Image: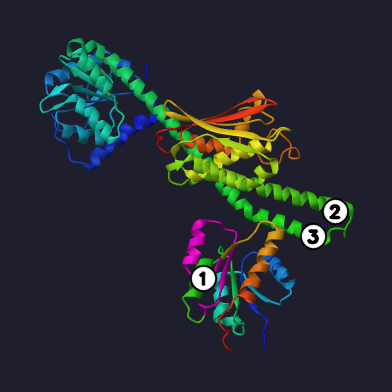
Amino acid sequence: MKTTPEILMVDDNPADIDLTSEVLSQSKKHFHVNAVSDGVEAISFLRRQGKYEAAPRPDLVVLDLNLPHIDGCEVLSNIKSDPALARIPVVIFTTSQADSDISRSYQLGANCYLKKPGNLAEFVAVVQSMAEFWLRFASLPQREKR
Amino acid sequence: MTFCSDPRRSSLVVDSVAETDLESPPASTEQGGDHPKVACKQGPKAGKGFNLKALIVEDEPADVDLTLRALRQGGLDAVWNVCQTAEEFTDLVRKNCYDVILADYKLPGWSGMESVEILRREGLDVPVILVSGALGEQTAVECIKQGAADYVLKDHLARLPESVRRAIRETKLREDHKHSQEELARSNQDLEQFAYVASHDLQEPLRMVATFTQLLAERYRGKLDADADKYIHYAVDGALRMQKLVQDLLAFSRVGKQGEARVSTDCNAALKAGLVNLEAAIHESGAVVEHAQLPVVIADGFQLVQVFQNLIGNAIKFRSSEPPLIRVSAQLQGKEWLFSVADNGIGIAAEQTENVFVIFRRLHTHTEYPGNGIGLSICKKIIEQHGGRIWVESQPGHRSTFQFTLPVKPTAKQ
């Protein structure tokens, strides 16, 4: 039985969360977007701690780099060094174009690095193709049974 | 007349004496310590409270006295140290801040000229006046060539005070010049940093404005009234234009910030890379770009591509009714390569030939010719950072020729 893909979006900008959810809600395939606004929350969500006890295991993490408390790179390294989480694809989605951020992200095991485009048409295109690629075309390890 | 009216300098003198007091055992000098000695009581003429701080390199005590007397007679009160060896000399100049060094040309074991060398090595700009019993004219000229400020014969010590005054004046001028150069460099750097931070940090809120006004336009077009559509369009247009400006500003500030290593770069290849980037514009305008054999220069290749691309892009953009014909050439002129990018375009009025290189300066409206007026300012910055110059000559209505130079041997990176 096919289930709805779960996306965890980690971003402290509510506008980007709204816009991304909006774009995904209009695509033909149905996605479920879970959003948290900082790195600590993201880790709790992934480890199903505290109020996230019943959280689904995401099929894709969309991670901003500039986050309060724990930044994106730390969240990324937490995910990739945890055997239970390491196989979840992580897409870095950020405004930073700095070479240092790009190489550090891939070094830490990011699956893809995308820059948030500055205009609507490109933003829509990037979000749609990201979801299509990772959740439709790419073959990923089976989600573990809950 | 006052000397060293610069308060920085006077306070340095005090500081260095204090440091010497605290930190170091007395150096062995003839006078048994490295505290400068006060040469004379404050005479009525020394009312400004300034004491000349001199280091006398001399092995003959009688000559030290003569030197001091000459200074005093010329109205210069001095605090002084005496030293005889290069080691003592080095030690003293490190610990104290002297206004002048009075060095005997001939000393047992070393020469007064070595003190010039030591000062240079220590990075100190203190004038050295050679005081000597006999110094041939040729030797004297040679010494000055090597960096001595002046020479005074022991028979003519009456000349000494004026020589000291002039040496100090010149050093102060040099220092002031260096100081203002440093200030300028610092303020340029600050400005660049500001441009970088501003443009970088502006991008994020601007992205919000652009994206969401576009979303409004898309979702509510035709659902409000005609005015609303128009206003939203203005907002979207403004945000997108500002985004482009901010990106350009960032690109401009990056020319100074980063820059690849300067390596041997084939200008023919750089030009070709620029032309590839302009392929669409060349094709659409029917432009013909001819080029002679171009040299290999030491440069940041990526930046050189930018220069060719911007210049040729402009030649295409500002074309006349004729299809653009662009000629790129280079010739050796002395120690520089002179590059030339000549076109048959609309040209530039004589009074605008300097303005075109100013950032965000545009000579036409957006509807006539799109663009932000960043391209040539980037070219200018790149060329100047490579130690070259750029300018334009033009016959309005007929042609423009942009010329720039690049040194054959690269200068130090600024």
Q: Which quarter of the picture shows residue B216?
A: bottom right
Q: Residue at x 76, y 60 (%)?
A: B215
How many angstroms separate mark 2 from mark 1 (CA)? 44 Å
Position of the C terminus of chain A by quadrant: bottom right
Q: Secondary structure at mark 1?
A: helix
Magenta segment: A85-112
Question: Is the residue at mark 3 from the same chain as the one at mark 1?
Answer: no
The kind of residue tagged 3 is Glu
- Determine which of the numbered discs, if any, sits on residue B218 in the image: 3
Q: Chain of mark 2?
A: B
Return the residue at label 2.
Answer: B228
- Determine which of the numbered discs, if any, sits on residue A58 in the image: none
Asked if one can make out residue B192 in the rendered structure from this viewpoint, the answer is no
Q: Label 1 near label 2: C-beta < 8 Å?
A: no
Report whether B8 appears left or right of B206.
left
Q: Which quarter of the picture shows residue B171?
A: top left
